[in-house]
Image (cartoon, rainbow, N blue to C red):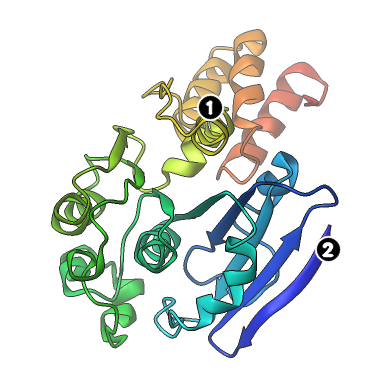
Amino acid sequence: MQVQTLVSHPRHRLSAHLPPQPSDTLVITFNPIRKGLCETGFGSDFMHWLGFSHVFVSEGTDSLYQDLDPEDLQAIRPLTDTHDRVFLYGSSLGGHAALYYANWMKARAVAISPRLPAHPYFRPFLTHGAKRLARVPLRHRDLPEVADPGLSPVILHDPWTEADEAYVDRFVRPAYPEAWFLPVRGAGHRVARVLAYQRRLKPILSDIFLNDRLPALGYEMGARPRRDLVLANRALDRGNAHLASRWLFRVMRDPSTPGLAAAMDRYRRLTGRWLLH
């Protein structure tokens, strides 16, 4: 995979990933917040797997993509002009960036749990550790002010998560009457992570990117790593190693789940062997 730096700025970086075989599809992805400047990140591996051309956009600490001017996007123009289909894709802050900049690209955005932490709408939802984000100057205009209403972005979010539903209600629905919505109820803000855990994220995105259609969600509300870990520990409490292994195998899809290592050790002490994926 050939990687080319298109824009290098202290506050953002645009890196082009061009597949060995030409593709008619270009996907521009945006990292979530506080990941730092890098050449690869959110969505990159999946775009490589699909064989798409890919531009990855990263942001400097707390810039919130607000230093990324539409003029910077001109560096992508040679690629957009040579691809029949162009998407912008991101989650959380990256979802907001995908929606915002899609208006200048005249392309479809796919946004998962979009939110803009620097906007006053978000202040009631800020946790103590994120209060500093309220002090970041807001330079992005509201989506309804810049939106092309003819665009039809795809929005996946949990309508039961107040901050994300507030963003969708205030900005997305008024801006895009033709938007496609996939509500993922009960998933919380980390919709992408929950769908990936259930092995639904790739099929859903593939249907959107390859077939340009709104797919069936196929989401199981209760199937989340922390809940499945609770069920695994309950089975271990009862000495039911077989049932515990079933739940642990599921949780192992998300090895960063807090408490997984301790549960695996409990399984080893109960059975005398390690559970291997």
Q: Earlier in the sequence, mark 2 or mark 1?
A: 2
Type of amino acid at the residue the image marks with label 1: Gln
Q: Residue at x 53, y 27 (%)?
A: 198
- Where residue 114 sits in the image (x, y, percent)? 34, 55
Q: Nearer the viewer, residue 276 or 215?
A: 215
Q: Nearer the viewer, residue 135 or 3?
A: 3
- Residue 250 occupies which quadrant of the picture? top right
- Where residue 217 sits in the image (x, y, percent)? 41, 24
Question: Dot 2: few (<14), some (14–19), or many (≥20) neighbours within 10 Å?
Answer: few
Residue bearing the label numbered 2: 2
Disc sitting over residue 254 in the figure: none
- Residue 91 occupies which quadrant of the picture? bottom left
Question: Dot 1: few (<14), some (14–19), or many (≥20) neighbours within 10 Å?
Answer: some
- Residues marked 2 and 1 touching at CB (< 8 Å): no
- Quarter of the figure that contains the C terminus: top right
Q: Residue at x 42, y 46 (%)?
A: 190
Task: Answer above or below: position of 146 versus 99.
Answer: below
Circle 1: element type: loop
- Quarter of the figure that contains the N terminus: bottom right
Q: Nearer the viewer, residue 251 or 140?
A: 140
Task: Answer above or below: position of 248 versus 202.
Answer: above
- Where residue 199 sits in the image (x, y, percent)? 58, 27
Type of amino acid at the residue the image marks with label 2: Gln
Circle 2: element type: strand
Residue bearing the label numbered 1: 198
